[in-house]
Image (tube, rainbow, N blue to C red):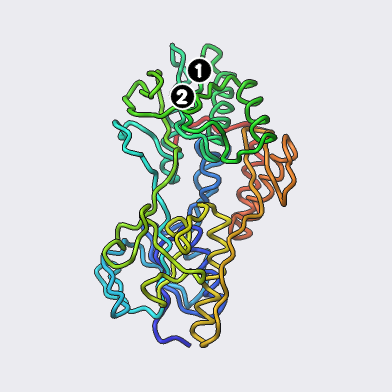
């Protein structure tokens, strides 16, 4: 067995599932994270729109990893010495046997002027801030304008759930008027360029009165408008969901990054510089090729990383990571969904139920699954939470 622990930097999907797999294999693990909890990010838009509460999607690491070989360092990594296999955590020098980099990604502002005026959706705090802002419009005496920049999976799911939240507010405040708009640099929504998907989403945007500005670039955001290459649009809240950039600033002087700032790894998910350092999730490119930034991708990579550390330690041949996805699912407001599973398209209420079922089972821990399930059930009878948090 290894003398020093495996140090995992980053507590998102990649870091958590790598830690889980390593502990199961009997390896001691130090997890370095800025927070003491894991955020189940695929459900953030439901917190932002009142379907779930914050405590439904955040899970304390030390409760989740009930293992004597697990240690949490709530910190930021300040330095790395890969030559001597050391990292600095909380000003303490830690020697590692293997290092796993899983620091995830942050919102890419694409150099938009006035980016300080946008809301983001990367953390539970972001979700609460969005909800509070929207709920504050309840007694607004003018037409409220909501702009979402970006029409990928996150932006598409968010705009439809915001419409449902505003509809709930309107049922209690009949004078409320609102206008929803998606500013889309491309001409597809939801991230899946397929006629069935695009046709379904287009019908829903028309049904709910959501304006979609395709092939439109946001150039500047003010406190009351969004300025694009096609004109200026009023905005009472602007939410940026246009994409992400890898959190790899710490590594730029010690590891080889590609033109997009991603850590370059081989087919075993080892960094090209050092066989004792693995990387996964949103921060990597494999043999120069980009990797889809998806939770399901990070979870599969985590299994490969943990297994390869064990094989490497035993002097055996490692397994290669094969990039593949099993499909996609989108929740587009209450009762509406679209997806593709193993090549088959599903849509409507059935797809929405499948989406909820899949993410319920992906929620870590039986207690947490029950909590999410309970909140969803309460929501069916009582409606969305309209309280400011």
Q: Residue at x 35, y 21 (%)?
A: 224
Earlier sequence position, callout 2 versus callout 1: 2
Tag 1 secondary structure:
strand
* Residue that label 1 marks: 178
- The image quadrant that residue 276 belongs to is bottom left
Nearest the eye: 23 or 322 = 322
Nearest the eye: 43 or 366 = 43
* Residue that label 2 marks: 146
Tag 2 secondary structure:
strand
Q: Is residue 23 left or right of residue 236?
A: right
Nearest the eye: 291 or 55 = 291
Q: Is residue 194 left or right of residue 1?
A: right
Q: Do the numbered discs 2 and 1 sit on residues whose CB atoms are within 8 Å?
A: yes
**Around disc 1, counting alpha carbons within 10 Å, would you say few (fewer than 14), some (14 to 19), or many (20 or more)?**
some
Furthest residue toward front: 288
Could you say which disc has been placed on residue 23 in the image?
A: none
Q: Residue at x 59, y 27 (%)?
A: 164
42 to 283, vertically: above or below: above
- The image quadrant that residue 223 belongs to is top left
Q: Quarter of the image containing the C terminus?
A: top left
Q: Residue at x 46, y 39 (%)?
A: 127
Horizontal and vertical percent position of residue 157: 57, 36
281 to 199, vertically: above or below: below
Furthest residue toward left: 91
229 to 118, vertically: above or below: above
Q: Residue at x 50, y 52 (%)?
A: 293
Horizontal and vertical percent position of residue 248: 34, 58
**Around disc 2, counting alpha carbons within 10 Å, would you say few (fewer than 14), some (14 to 19), or many (20 or more)?**
many
Horizontal and vertical percent position of residue 299: 56, 61
């Amino acid at each position: 067995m290894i003398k020093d622990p495996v140090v995992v930097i980053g507590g998102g999907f990649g870091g958590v599932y790598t830690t889980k797999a390593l502990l199961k294999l009997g390896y001691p693990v130090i997890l370095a994270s800025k927070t003491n909890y894991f955020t189940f990010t695929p459900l953030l838009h439901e917190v932002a729109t009142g379907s779930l509460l914050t405590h439904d999607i955040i899970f304390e690491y030390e409760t989740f990893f009930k293992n004597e070989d697990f240690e949490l360092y709530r910190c930021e990594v300040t330095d790395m010495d890969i030559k001597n296999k050391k990292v600095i955590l909380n000003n303490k020098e830690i020697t590692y046997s293997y290092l796993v980099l899983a620091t995830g990604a942050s919102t890419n502002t694409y150099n938009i002027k006035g980016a300080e005026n946008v809301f983001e959706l990367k953390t539970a705090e972001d979700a609460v801030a969005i909800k509070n802002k929207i709920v504050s419009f309840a007694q607004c005496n003018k037409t409220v304008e909501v702009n979402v920049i970006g029409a990928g999976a996150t932006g598409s799911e968010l705009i439809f759930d915001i419409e449902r939240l505003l509809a709930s507010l309107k049922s209690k405040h009949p004078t409320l008027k609102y206008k929803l708009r998606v500013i889309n640099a491309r001409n597809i929504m939801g991230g899946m360029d397929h006629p069935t998907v695009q046709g379904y989403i287009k019908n829903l945007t028309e049904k709910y009165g959501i304006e979609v500005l395709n092939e439109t670039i946001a150039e500047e955001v003010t406190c009351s408008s969004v300025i694009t290459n096609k004109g200026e649009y009023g905005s009472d809240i602007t939410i940026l969901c246009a994409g992400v950039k890898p959190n790899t600033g710490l590594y730029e002087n010690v590891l080889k990054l590609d033109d997009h700032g991603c850590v370059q790894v081989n087919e075993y998910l080892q960094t090209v510089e050092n066989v004792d350092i693995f990387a996964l999730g949103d921060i990597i490119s494999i043999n120069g090729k980009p990797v889809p930034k998806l939770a399901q991708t990070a979870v599969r990579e985590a299994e490969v990383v943990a297994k390869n550390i064990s094989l490497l330690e035993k002097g055996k041949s490692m397994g290669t990571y094969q990039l593949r996805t099993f499909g996609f699912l989108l929740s587009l407001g209450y009762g509406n969904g679209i997806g593709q599973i193993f090549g088959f398209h599903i849509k409507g209420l059935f797809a929405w139920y499948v989406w909820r079922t899949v993410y319920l089972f992906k929620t870590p821990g039986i207690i947490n699954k029950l909590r999410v399930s309970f909140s969803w059930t309460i929501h069916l009878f009582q409606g969305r939470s309209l309280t400011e948090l």
